[in-house]
Image: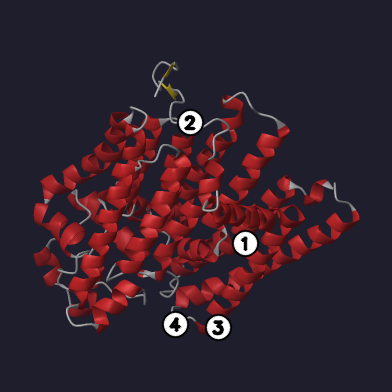
């Protein structure tokens, strides 16, 4: 009983903070701090696309902050006003995403189409070049000889350190040269569609369980709002989508996969995380944990078919066209054995150990392996039986990996932050290890 008390208190304090002033207090803190972050970015960032984002996003966050202040004042006068309730908070979140992410994204895309060369991060160009190569040669990758033949200053841009599916976002630019074919525009479209489907899936959980009371619906919507805010208006996500963008559709598909897991749709969960894995390696650990979750419900095969099958299907054409190019881009370069090294060097523990200590890279690699072994032991001894546990393991596991990797980026933190914030929205009205698993082909249920 004594051991359970601190955890209970932590949950109580978080719920109290989240519910303060009907959720508006935390909304105010989110938008106000984000406005400060965006303003500082606009003034101090050494990356020109980031400065441009900050100048626009600071205004968007400020307007959202003022809107929440107005809601708080109105709530004091009329606590039951519809302008202070959950639908109004959703509306402010949507407007905030439009002003802090979509507006600067479109603005930079139009400027870039007009000739500005400082309106996109390198990831945008890499994905669009990959789309052009896929269209012309059947593979998004350059071989090692072709990369070596590039001028030294351009060799880094010759690499495509993504899975083959990412090149699909570059195809519009390969076909038409216009602002709306900027790969970031299509990253945003994919992100919005995946998040919308995830929200619709989770909002249907109380009804599917026969417990769609106003109280359960409100709890679900409140948790969902926080999860969506973390994946959209949180500055680390808004900045990433507006200036580079490639991580957001991967993250959104992972969140969709967890939503399907919460709805006991293992086949669809596998397909969603498989699509994410066909885009980027960051989704593969999530796929592994979801497969373990599926095994606890006798549905591991259904999860694995999509989670493993789709990435393999995406890799096969590139493997058949040019195996050496695939190996150079997808394996050698991310592991630090390419012709050039990745510039991703955020000062996390793994990078600091690798750069400051003798044999630092070996030590950092050993720590990373040790963390992976610890997570594997956790999965074997206590496999996740709910979508909530799956999201928490993924979130903390990715956080540990990002901290210990010798080569990483600060922006990668968007994955664990969003996954951990998404977890409360995944609670099922009735979620037990032996709850029925729907048969997605017949609509009937089978016992887990």
Which residue is under mark 3? 43
Please state which of the two labelled residues, at mark 1 or mark 2, is closer to the viewer: 2
Q: Disc 2 or 3, which lies upstream in sequence?
A: 3
Asked if labels 3 and 1 touch by Cβ distance under 8 angstroms, the answer is: no
Q: Which mark is residue 99?
A: 1
Q: Quadrant of residue 73?
A: bottom right
Along the line of sight, which residue is nearer the eye, 337 or 446?
A: 446
Q: Disc 2 or 4, which lies upstream in sequence?
A: 4
What scheme was used to colour the molecule? secondary structure
Q: CA distance from mark 1 to mark 4?
A: 23 Å
The answer to whether residue 2 is visible is yes
Q: Disc 1 or 3, which lies upstream in sequence?
A: 3
Along the line of sight, which residue is nearer the eye, 49 or 27?
A: 27
Q: Disc 1 or 2, which lies upstream in sequence?
A: 1
How busy is the neighbourhood of tag 1: few (under 14 within 10 Å), some, or many (20 plus)? Answer: many
What SS does tag 1 mark? Answer: helix
Asked if labels 4 and 1 touch by Cβ distance under 8 angstroms, the answer is: no
Q: Which mark is residue 46?
A: 4
Q: Is residue 142 left or right of residue 244?
A: left
Which residue is under mark 2? 432
């Amino acid at each position: 009983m004594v051991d359970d008390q601190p955890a209970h208190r932590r949950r109580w304090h978080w719920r109290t903070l989240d519910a303060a002033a009907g959720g508006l207090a935390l909304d105010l803190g989110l938008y106000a701090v984000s406005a400060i972050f965006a303003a500082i970015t606009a003034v101090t960032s050494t990356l020109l696309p980031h400065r441009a984002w900050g100048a626009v996003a600071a205004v968007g966050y400020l307007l959202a902050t003022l809107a929440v202040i107005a809601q708080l004042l109105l709530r004091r006068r009329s606590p039951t006003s519809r302008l202070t309730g959950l639908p109004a908070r959703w509306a402010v979140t949507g407007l905030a995403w439009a002003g802090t992410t979509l507006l600067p994204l479109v603005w930079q895309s139009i400027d870039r189409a007009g000739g500005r060369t400082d309106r996109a991060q390198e990831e945008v160009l890499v994905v669009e070049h990959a789309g052009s190569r896929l269209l012309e040669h059947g593979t998004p990758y350059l071989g090692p000889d072709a990369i070596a033949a590039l001028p030294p200053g351009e060799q880094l841009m010759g690499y495509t350190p993504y899975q083959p599916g990412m090149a699909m976002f570059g195809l519009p630019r390969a076909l038409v040269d216009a602002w709306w074919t900027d790969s970031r525009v299509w990253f945003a479209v994919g992100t919005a569609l995946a998040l919308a489907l995830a929200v619709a899936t989770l909002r249907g959980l109380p009804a599917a369980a026969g417990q769609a009371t106003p109280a359960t619906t409100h709890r679900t919507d409140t948790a969902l709002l926080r999860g969506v805010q973390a994946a959209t208006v949180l500055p680390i996500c808004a900045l990433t989508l507006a200036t580079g963008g490639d991580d957001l559709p991967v993250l959104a598909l992972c969140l969709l996969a967890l939503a399907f897991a919460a709805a006991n749709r293992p086949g669809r969960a596998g397909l969603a995380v498989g699509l994410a894995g066909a885009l980027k390696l960051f989704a593969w650990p999530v796929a592994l944990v979801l497969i373990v979750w599926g095994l606890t419900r006798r549905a591991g095969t259904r999860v694995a078919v999509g989670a493993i099958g789709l990435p393999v299907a995406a890799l096969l054409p590139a493997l058949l066209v040019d195996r050496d190019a695939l190996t150079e881009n997808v394996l050698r370069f991310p592991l630090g054995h390419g012709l050039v090294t990745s510039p991703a060097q955020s000062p996390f523990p793994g990078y600091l150990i690798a750069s400051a200590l003798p044999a630092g890279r070996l030590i950092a690699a050993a720590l990373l392996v040790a963390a992976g072994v610890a997570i594997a032991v956790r999965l074997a001894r206590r496999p996740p039986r709910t979508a909530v546990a799956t999201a928490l393991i993924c979130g903390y596991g990715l956080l540990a990996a990002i901290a210990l990797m010798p080569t990483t980026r600060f922006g990668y933190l968007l994955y664990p932050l969003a996954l951990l914030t998404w977890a409360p929205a995944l609670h099922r009205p009735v979620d037990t290890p032996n709850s029925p698993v729907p048969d997605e082909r017949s609509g009937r249920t089978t016992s887990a």
